[in-house]
Each structure stands twice: as C-alpha cells, then as structure tokens.
Amino acid sequence: MAQRKGAGSLRALLHFQEREVSDDGFGNPVTGDFATVFTDAVELIPRMGTEAVMASRLQGVQPYTARVRASSWTRQVTPAWRAVDARSGAVYAIVSPFVDLDQKGAYLEGLLTVGGQTSS
C-alpha cells in the first residue's frame, strides 16, 4: 500500500515573490523589485545522487524538490518568480514550474535551487 502524504510534512514556509511592473512615466513598463504575492507551507526535499546534482554542488548550488498544496496561487508560479524562506531568509530560484506528478490534484512539485548567483 502506498504511503499517504499529509500536511504534516509541509514544514517550510516560503514567500512566493514576483517582480513588480511599473510605468516609467513615459508609458513604458519597467520591472522593479520582487514583491510577495502569497505565502504557503512547503515540503523541501534535497536532491541527491544524480550527475547533474553533483555538478551543481561543485558550483555551490543545492537543488531541492518543493512539494506544495495545489491551489490557484501555486499554479501561477513560473521560473520568473522566486521563493524566500520566511524563517531563514534563504532565497530559492524557481527552476521549473510546479506540476501535478501523481495526477491526483492534491499536491504540486517543482524544482528550486539555493546558492550560486541570485538576482535581487
């Protein structure tokens, strides 16, 4: 029997942020700083063992699989966004959008990285 996933494993709290778009005064859109769109509980699972993961670690990057509850908010997250840990302040780059891997619609999973170069 498959082990059921519960909300108890969603221990991390992340702020999902998107760049603000404003007007430069001449009608041109200008991207600004990141602003928090929503905050959600997340399970962060460190990725281990693959060749790509080992190469990333040599560059100072740690990849994570992030599991979140499926919602209208989490479905809009794209790689243009970033996530910030609400407790530690660590900044995670969103490498891939969240997808429904188990096809049950309860949880979405995506790839995040921390470390290396980050844009502010």
Image (cartoon, grey):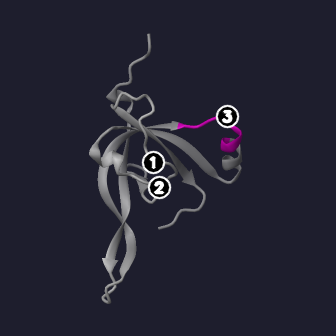
Q: Nearer the viewer, mark 3 or mark 2?
A: 2
Q: Which amino acid lies under the numbered mark 2 shown in the image of this protein?
A: Pro
Q: Is residue 30 above or below residue 82?
A: below
Q: Position of residue 28 (x, y in %)?
A: 36, 83
Alpha carbon separation for disc pair 3 and 2: 24 Å
Question: Tag 3: Cα neighbours inside 10 Å, few (<14), some, or many (≥20)?
Answer: few
Q: Is residue 70 above or below residue 91?
A: above
State the residue position of label 1: 97
Q: Earlier in the sequence, mark 3 or mark 2?
A: 3
Question: Tag 1: Cα neighbours inside 10 Å, few (<14), some, or many (≥20)?
Answer: some
Question: Mark 2 and mark 1 in contact (Cβ < 8 Å)?
Answer: yes
Q: Earlier in the sequence, mark 1 or mark 2?
A: 2
Q: Which amino acid lies under the numbered mark 1 shown in the image of this protein?
A: Pro
Q: Residue at point 38% right, 24% down?
A: 5
Q: Is residue 48 magenta?
A: yes
Alpha carbon separation for disc pair 1 and 2: 6 Å
State the residue position of label 2: 79
Q: Residue at point 32% right, 38% down?
A: 70
Does dot 3 land on a helix, a strand or a loop? Answer: loop
Alpha carbon separation for disc pair 3 and 1: 22 Å
Any mark on residue 49, and which? 3
Which segment did they paint magenta?
46-53
Closest to the observer, 69 or 76: 76
